[in-house]
Amino acid sequence: MNVDFIESGKEFGGQVVNLFPAVKELGLNMNMSNAQLNPNLTIDRIFEPFQTLNLERVIILVAGLNQSIVLIDVLKAMSALKGTKSVRFCNTRIAESEFSPQIQNLILLSRGFKRVEISGLEEPEIVAQMRPMFEASGAPINFTGGVLWNNQI
């Protein structure tokens, strides 16, 4: 099942779980470019209803992210889901000053994933500096910059 949502939040997730309680594969597309999240609705609360599903595979596409803390929040929330997990953050625009402090968290959280891809409008210098750190860690992170992705994982 593939679902495209962000602003509907927890209520929408609960409805999906009620309608499809036996779903084994879940694909979510989250466009953060123009999203105005309800301040009372956190990323972990958006994913909470899906924790009850006995999932075998989870694929999340998060487009237009510009805050590294949201990237970390998505990984934390996905960690609580069952099944093999992959996530692609595309069309990202995260400043180095915000991204750098989150590298260790990103590495640690990504260990429970099959694949974590981060691509977007990152400066080549940032990519050249950070990619070796991800590769040396053995984490399943593929970090590229300067590319706009419009396809899914």
Image: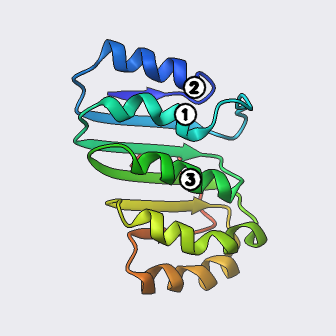
For residue 127, above or below residue 64: below
Where residue 78 appears, x then y in whole percent? 43, 47
**Closer to viewer: mark 1 or mark 2:** 1
Residue at x 54%, y 53% (from the top left corner)? 89
Where residue 13 appears, x then y in whole percent? 46, 23
The answer to which image quadrant residue 124 occupies is bottom right
**Closer to viewer: mark 2 or mark 3:** 2
- Sequence order check: which comes first, mark 1 or mark 2? 2
Q: Are marks 1 and 3 in contact (CB under 8 Å)?
A: no
Disc 1 versus disc 3: distance between alpha carbons? 22 Å
Q: Are marks 1 and 2 in contact (CB under 8 Å)?
A: yes
Where residue 19 appears, x then y in whole percent? 33, 12
Q: Which residue is mark 3?
A: 90
Q: Which residue is mark 1?
A: 45
Disc 2 versus disc 3: distance between alpha carbons? 20 Å
Residue at x 43%, y 52% (from the top left corner)? 87
- Sequence order check: which comes first, mark 1 or mark 3? 1
Q: The residue tagged with tag 3: helix, strand or loop?
A: strand
For residue 128, above or below residue 69: below
Where residue 92 appears, x then y in whole percent? 64, 56
Residue at x 35%, y 61% (from the top left corner)? 112
Tally the numbered discs: 3
**Closer to viewer: mark 1 or mark 3:** 1
Q: The residue tagged with tag 1: helix, strand or loop?
A: helix
